[in-house]
Image (cartoon, rainbow, N blue to C red):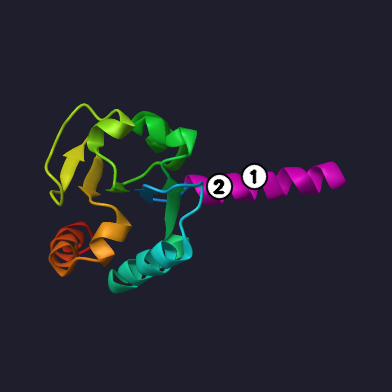
Amino acid sequence: MIDEAVAVVEQVTKEATSTKKIVIIAEAKTNVLPPNQQLFLEAILKACKLNIADVAVLTDKDPLTADHKEINAHYGAENIILFGRSPSSIALPVYFPPFQVQSFQETNYLHAPSLEAIEADKTLKVQLWQSLKQLFP
């Protein structure tokens, strides 16, 4: 009986994590975002009419983030946003400038400076907002 309950919980957890259509990968010193960056990210998501439950947030310390194919296989992501990471950091074979939305194999990608850099610079915030409006009209 307990084994069945554990199996159900594992399946629900797997389905919940594998159905995130938006993946955010942020540069961080540890495997979790610092509280100030977490709050800033939540504010960004709120402006896009999303919340933290709508996205999978990973840091660059997560081994899954080394390859876009693994990320897509795990999450089935429609949108991947990189903060403080370049497209090549996830083995993406195309390069595009920061703040440009780029489609590749049915996934939209966006890369931008780190959350910390964006939070401190109004010009970067405006550029990010313009890009996010393309991803989430």
- Report whether 4 appears left or right of 63: right
For label 1, the residue is 11
Query: Tag on residue 15?
Result: 2
- Relative vertical location of residue 93 with respect to residue 5 in this rendering, above or below: above
Q: Which residues are magenta?
A: 1-18
Label 2: few (<14), some or many (≥20) within 10 Å?
few
Residue 81 counted in the magenta span: no
Amino acid at the residue labelled 2: Glu
Report the side of 3 relative to 85 (left or right): right
Percent x, y for residue 18? 49, 44
Image quarter in which the C terminus is found? bottom left
Q: On the image, which quarter does residue 73 sit in?
A: top left
Q: Which residue sits at x=48%, y=33%?
A: 63
Disc 2 is placed on an element classified as helix
Closest to the observer: 13 or 41? 41
Q: Position of residue 16 (x, y in %)?
A: 54, 51
Question: In this orientation, does residue 67 appear?
Answer: yes
The spot of residue 65 in percent (x, y) is 41, 36
- On the image, the x and y values in percent for residue 71 come to 40, 36
